[in-house]
Amino acid sequence: MLELNCMTEKKKDNWFLFGDIHCKAGPLKKFYEENKERLSLDECSNKIILLGDVGLNFHTRRPGDDEFRAELSSLPFTYICLRGNHEARISFARADHPDEWTDMEKYGGTITVEKKYPHIEYLSDGPAVYEFNGYKTLSLPGAYSVRRGCRHHDDPSLVIHDELLRPDEMDCGREIIKNNNSFDLVISHTCPLKYEPRDLFRYDIDQTKVDKSVEEFLDEIEENISYKRWAFGHFHAERLYPENDGRRLLLLFQDKVADLGKFMNARADQSFSDITA
């Protein structure tokens, strides 16, 4: 594994959180064009944590992937990609093209990058601990896909099990928090079951047929750790949950970019508009 070198020239670090972009660079281009002068993005080190369903690896390789990667890489961002449910595991992509990928030690953990696109970074396929801008962060990837009811328990052949967290990965998550249960930030693609935004559910989907194992696991994790903030995507909306005992959750999609520092330090009386970049 390679060790990343520190930058010789100190730059200001900007850290952002963003939701699902589903193979679309447009929302990130719009953010850059609207903010490049105000945020001096070209003179800064800019990192965007993408909360799953980025679309870079819907399959391990498909037509148009290089074009999308090149579009993202043309912007002055480093992308930190959490695995969602609409993308292959990065371990699968690496296994298919082993010479094109490498692991790196960064953020206090291990990330994977495609050598051709070093500013697109992939977090672990399973639970892991990182440090982002000084915030101790628990990363919890995966979710279940609901596509017009075609992925149901009663037809296992239609379920892509690898989009979920596997039982051994859930056990790994449990081991992580046994003696390491205090975090500043938790990032996940979906959210703990108790926080599901049920008003956003599709009316044509029978929820009794939906696999909730990841949400149930996140419930278990949430009940057994101390944390300050939790950010997730998946539900195609934006909202900042009310503060509860110092904890606060954030749901993001592709319409708004959250400033990580503002989110981490938001007061109980502040709203979603107060944490946007």
Image (cartoon, rainbow, N blue to C red):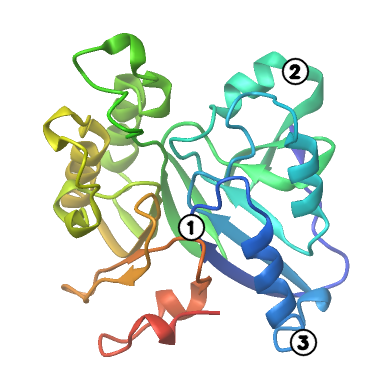
The residue that label 3 is drawn on is 37
Nearest the eye: 222 or 194: 194
Q: Is residue 20 left or right of residue 61?
A: left
Q: Are marks 2 and 3 in contact (CB under 8 Å)?
A: no
Mark 3 Cα within 10 Å, few/some/many (few <14, many 20+)? few
- How crowded is the residue under tag 1: few (<14 C-alpha within 10 Å), some, or many (20+)? many
Q: What residue is drawn where x is 50% and y is 77%?
A: 261
Q: Position of residue 149 (x, y in %)?
A: 27, 29
Q: Nearer the viewer, residue 34 or 148?
A: 148
Q: If you read the primary sequence from the N terminus, does the residue marked by circle 1 or circle 2 appear first?
A: 1
Residue positioned 49% across, 31% down in the render: 125
Whether residue 102 sits left or right of residue 59 in the image: it is: right
Q: Whole-percent x and y of residue 48?
A: 61, 61
Residue 45 is left or right of residue 272, and the answer is right
Q: Is residue 230 above or below residue 161?
A: below
Residue drawn where x is 33% and y is 47% of the image: 190
| The quadrant where residue 205 appears | top left
**Disc sitting over residue 98 in the figure:** 2
Identify the mark nearer the N-term, 2 or 3. 3
User: Can you say which quadrant of the picture contains the C terminus?
Assistant: bottom right
Judging from the image, what secondary structure is the residue with disc 3 in? Answer: loop
Tell which residue pokes out farthest to the right in this image.
8
> Amino acid type of disc 1?
Gly
Foreground tag (2 vs 3): 3
The CA distance from mark 1 to mark 3 is 23 Å
Mark number displayed over residue 19: 1
Q: Position of residue 25 (x, y in %)?
A: 68, 55
